[in-house]
Amino acid sequence: MLAWWVEFAPAERILDLGCGVGVVALALARCRGAAAVTGLELQEELAELARANVAANDAAASVTIVQGDARALPAELHSAFDVVCANPPFREAGAGRVNPAAGKALARHELTLPLEDLTTAAAEALRPGGRFYLIHQPRRLEDLACASAAAGLHLERLRFVQPRRGEDANLVLAAASRGGARDAVVGPPLEIYGPAGEYAPEVAALYEGRGRPLYEG
């Protein structure tokens, strides 16, 4: 969903903050035609897996993986991107059970990258007027708005994701801009499943390679 939420022109430079094994970066390049995607990953093991995935998908011309810490953004990444995206840890440090596997714990809890640090890193990486796209949980929306504003990012578009029609949203897709001032627009809910448990039409179309970007919904 995140890869199809990001709006960009083909030649714009994109940074995937906390890219993991490179899934979103590869989807942006291979499925959506992005020409210049950089993935930044803290964990060495995941960064190596991301590089292997880039090679296996013959995407080295359009995807670069950098190992580094978003809290100390490498100098060459400052003000270098038109677009930043992130699928960050959803849970606050100390909230709920922390996975005993260190890698999974870092991916799920804000042990090394709280929202405030994430939005600061996104703002530092963006050029003036650049855009930041992420997916999070609706319960953290107020935290996200406050952290974004503190970093100089203005929320401009939201789209809530619900498992099925009529159910509460469990995810939210958000878009912000560096220095923006437009009122936020809330798009229609995105339904994942239909009544019989099949993928709903909009999501099914994405998997079948004929879908529209989610910001057009």
Image (cartoon, rainbow, N blue to C red):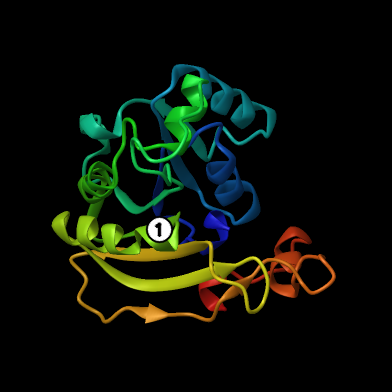
Drawn side of residue 53 relative to residue 11, left or right: right
What percent of the width, then of the height, locates residue 99?
A: 51, 27
Q: Is residue 55 above or below residue 9?
A: above
What percent of the width, then of the height, locates residue 192?
A: 68, 66
Can you tell which quarter of the image residue 75 is in? top left
Q: How many marks?
A: 1
Disc 1 crowd rating (10 Å Cα; few below 14, some 14-19, many 20+) is many
Residue occupying the point 53% across, 81% down: 188
What percent of the width, then of the height, locates residue 118?
A: 29, 44
For badge 1, the amino acid type reads Tyr
* Residue 128 visible within the image: no
Single out the residue that lies furthest toward the right: 196
Dot 1: what SS?
strand
Residue occupying the point 57% across, 61% down: 4
Residue occupying the point 34% across, 63% down: 141
Single out the residue that lies furthest toward the front: 96
- In the picture, the quarter occupied by the C terminus is bottom right
Q: Toward the viewer: 184 or 53?
A: 184
* Residue with the mark numbered 1: 133
Q: Is residue 10 above or below residue 14?
A: below
Q: Is residue 63 above or below residue 119?
A: above
Q: Toward the viewer: 184 or 96?
A: 96
- In the picture, the quarter occupied by the N terminus is bottom right
What percent of the width, then of the height, locates residue 35?
A: 50, 48
Residue occupying the point 27% across, 37% down: 77
* Residue 205 visible within the image: yes
